[in-house]
Image (cartoon, rainbow, N blue to C red):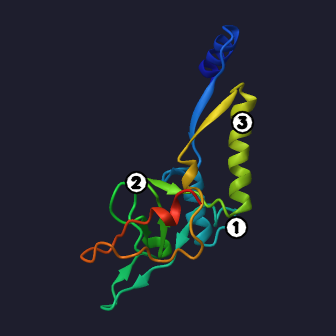
Amino acid sequence: MQDFEELVEAIHARGMKVVLDIALNHSSSENIWMKESIAAHLGEDNGKKDFYMWGDPKYDDQGNKVPPNNWQSVFQGSMWKYVPEIDKYFLHTFGDEQADLNWESPATRHAIYDVLRFWLDKGVDGFRLDAIDCISKVEGWPDAEIIWPNQFEQKANEMFANG
């Protein structure tokens, strides 16, 4: 952090600005928030239960567990990853190691604002908001239209982009 602070100071001394590239649609699935969200689903009272977009399994005609809907991720495959210890799926617009944050949760929003404030207090002048067009999902997560009848996952851009 000291190196970063010195870098910001040196950049500002040269009359330039510092802009950070930050993704606010998702965090790493290894992030402490994700671990705490799973713990909250297991009964821990930590206020992070709804930090991510969690969905219950559905069952197909043969009784097999399937994701909450048929949305295909941007990187292919299902937009849902199963977490067996809580019997829920989390939504990931991109890779399954990039869990989507739940912007409908006021607690999540305030935590994100705190992260932004942290960087602003370090002297950052602004942000490039990567994947910001994906923070809003269609309410209720309905299935996407079937355009590929031979596969479960379907293109669902209208369900998660530019909300």
Closer to viewer: mark 2 or mark 3: 2
Label 2 or label 3, whichever comes before in sequence order = 2
Residue at x-position 61% and y-position 61%: 102
Q: Which residue is mark 3?
A: 118
Classify 24 as above or below 77: above
In the visual, does 3 lie left or right of 142? right
Q: Amino acid at mark 2?
A: Gly
Q: Which residue is mark 1?
A: 45
The percent coordinates of residue 69 (x first, y second) are 44, 75
Q: Which residue is mark 2?
A: 95
Q: Amino acid at mark 1?
A: Asp
Classify 16 as above or below 58: above
For label 1, the SS is loop
Q: CA distance from mark 2 to mark 3?
A: 26 Å
Identity of the residue furthest to the top in this view: 14
Classify 156 as above or below 152: above
In the visual, does 107 lie left or right of 89? right
Residue at x-position 60% and y-position 54%: 33
Could you say which is closer to the camera, residue 147 or residue 118? 147
The image's mark for residue 89 is: none
For label 2, the SS is loop
In the visual, does 97 lie left or right of 34? left
Total numbered labels: 3
Classify 133 as above or below 51: above
The percent coordinates of residue 78 (x first, y second) are 37, 66
For label 3, the SS is helix
Could you say which is closer to the camera, residue 90 or residue 14? 14
In the rendered view of the protein, which quadrant contains the C terminus?
Answer: bottom right
Label 1 or label 2, whichever comes before in sequence order = 1
The percent coordinates of residue 84 (x first, y second) are 43, 72
